[in-house]
């Protein structure tokens, strides 16, 4: 039987977590294990670009700003330095020469993760799907999985038929727990709605990718969560800036959630740090994060059925890891030793928070 991938919606769709034109790719992380994985991940994205003859990555650098003495900022700096990732540390005197149109807050440090950049997300999904089909895989969209029956042969029932397979990989994003419920497992996942905000440049082009304006990560603003952004590129004259959090929602009724308190924070941040942007979003779109309690991914085998493997809870930062996540899930299915230590991603870390009826 060929490898099959089933998607609930007609592809491409905007109902989950992977839509939109751009995502940030970076090695700047607080934890070494992500930075280590990203080394290989950059190579895998480049390999995909070569094989498909498509450009998926544009280097822009990632400007990291945050209170210089804070734990979050220092951990990222240490990880980058320890792993010899090329960075440039900026100081107050040379900051505006390197990064025009941004105000560095008093007490904030700034550094640039030089190899970071933008991944063309929509294009990347299309490319992966095309390569999968080229290799003999079959994609069935607009087909809902309605049951997963564990056993030595797993039986997957969908709105269109029944499949039997030696192994099954579940990567259902915000709907992960709905599918895993059929196997008696529930993960501690929270689905939140993200307001994806685009901000108008007062002078067109001043934050443009062509002017080499970088992506950015603000590790703290008003002592709240991260704020991140990408240079204007996908919509002419608009820069994407988002708050790394949102309100809990039901993925089937996402737009019923109308909380805009994150947008208030973003407006204050834009007014304070980005004087060249109109501090009111010109466009607001929606996307979903599926959060774990520690914001680390879940990559594991089912505790009672080792031929059911799952990847879930990508907590708003999983896109860039796509190729390596695919490789690791494949190793789990084949019973091979995973290429990386998976202990940060195993479900046993949740212990009392994981409900298994089996
Ligand atoms: C606003 C925003 C910005 C982000 N920025 C970044 C970034 O800069 N860098 C980065 O690395 N990451 C980023 N992320 C995170 C990244 O996009 C996600 O981690 C990633 O897209 C998660 O993919 P997924 O496959 O788990 O979920 P999804 O893309 O939602 O896919 C789940 C799939 O499961 C299918 N499905 C569900 N239930 C069923 C069923 N019953 N039957 C059949 N199919 C089913 C759905 O059709 C869907 O296609 C961002 C996310 C958002 C929302």
Image: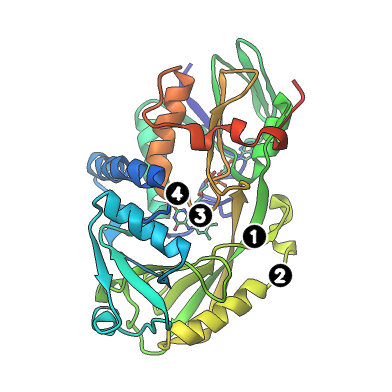
- Disc 4/disc 2 C-alpha distance (Å): 25 Å
The image position of residue 240, as x and y in percent, is 46, 71
Determine the secondary structure under disc 2.
loop
Q: Are marks 4 and 2 in contact (CB under 8 Å)?
A: no
Residue 193, label in figure: 1
Residue 175 in sight from this viewpoint: yes
- Side (left or right) of 86 relative to 298: left
Considering every residue shown, the one lying at the far top of the view is 152
Would you name the residue on which mark 4 appears?
319
- Side (left or right) of 275 relative to 83: right
- Disc 4/disc 3 C-alpha distance (Å): 10 Å
Quadrant assignment, res 101: bottom left
Residue at 53% across, 42% down? 297
> Within 8 Å of ligand 1, the CB of disc 3?
yes
The image position of residue 326, as x and y in percent, is 43, 34
Would you name the residue on which mark 2 appears?
259
Considering every residue shown, the one lying at the far front of the view is 69
Above-or-below relation of 20 to 267: above
- Disc 4/disc 1 C-alpha distance (Å): 17 Å
Q: Are marks 2 and 3 in contact (CB under 8 Å)?
A: no
Q: Are marks 1 and 2 in contact (CB under 8 Å)?
A: yes
In terms of sequence position, does the residue under pointer 3 or pointer 1 come before the other? 3
Would you name the residue on which mark 3 appears?
19
Quadrant containing the C terminus is: top right
């Amino acid at each position: 039987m060929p490898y099959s991938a089933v998607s609930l919606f007609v592809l491409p769709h905007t109902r989950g977590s992977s839509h939109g034109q751009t995502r940030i790719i970076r090695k700047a992380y607080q934890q070494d294990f992500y930075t280590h994985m990203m080394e290989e991940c950059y190579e895998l994205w480049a390999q995909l670009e070569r094989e498909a003859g498509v450009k998926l990555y544009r280097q822009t650098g990632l400007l990291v700003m945050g209170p210089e003495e804070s734990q979050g900022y220092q951990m990222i700096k240490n990880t980058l330095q320890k792993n010899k990732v090329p960075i440039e540390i900026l100081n107050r005197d040379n900051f505006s020469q390197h990064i025009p149109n941004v105000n560095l807050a008093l007490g904030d440090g700034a550094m640039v993760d030089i190899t970071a950049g933008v991944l063309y997300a929509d294009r990347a999904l299309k490319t992966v799907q095309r390569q999968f089909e080229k290799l003999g895989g079959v994609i069935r969209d607009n087909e809902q999985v309605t049951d997963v029956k564990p056993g030595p042969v797993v039986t997957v029932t969908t709105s269109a038929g029944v499949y039997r397979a030696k192994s099954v990989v579940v990567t259902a994003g915000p709907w992960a727990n709905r599918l895993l419920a059929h196997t008696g497992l529930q993960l501690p996942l929270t689905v939140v709605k993200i307001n994806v905000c685009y901000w108008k440049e007062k002078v067109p082009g001043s934050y443009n990718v062509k002017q080499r304006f970088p992506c950015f990560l603000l590790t703290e603003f008003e002592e709240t969560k991260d704020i991140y952004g990408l240079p204007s590129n996908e919509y002419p004259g608009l820069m994407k800036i988002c708050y790394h959090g949102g309100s809990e929602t039901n993925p089937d009724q996402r737009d019923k959630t109308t909380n805009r308190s994150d947008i208030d924070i973003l407006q204050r941040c834009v007014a304070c740090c980005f004087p060249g942007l109109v501090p009111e979003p010109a466009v607001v779109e929606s996307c979903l994060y599926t959060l774990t309690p520690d914001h680390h991914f879940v990559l594991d085998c089912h505790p009672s059925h080792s031929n059911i493997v799952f990847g879930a809870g990508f907590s708003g930062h999983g896109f860039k890891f796509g190729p390596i996540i695919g490789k690791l899930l494949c190793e789990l299915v084949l019973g091979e030793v995973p290429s990386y230590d998976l202990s940060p991603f195993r479900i046993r870390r949740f212990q009392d928070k994981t409900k298994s009826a089996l």
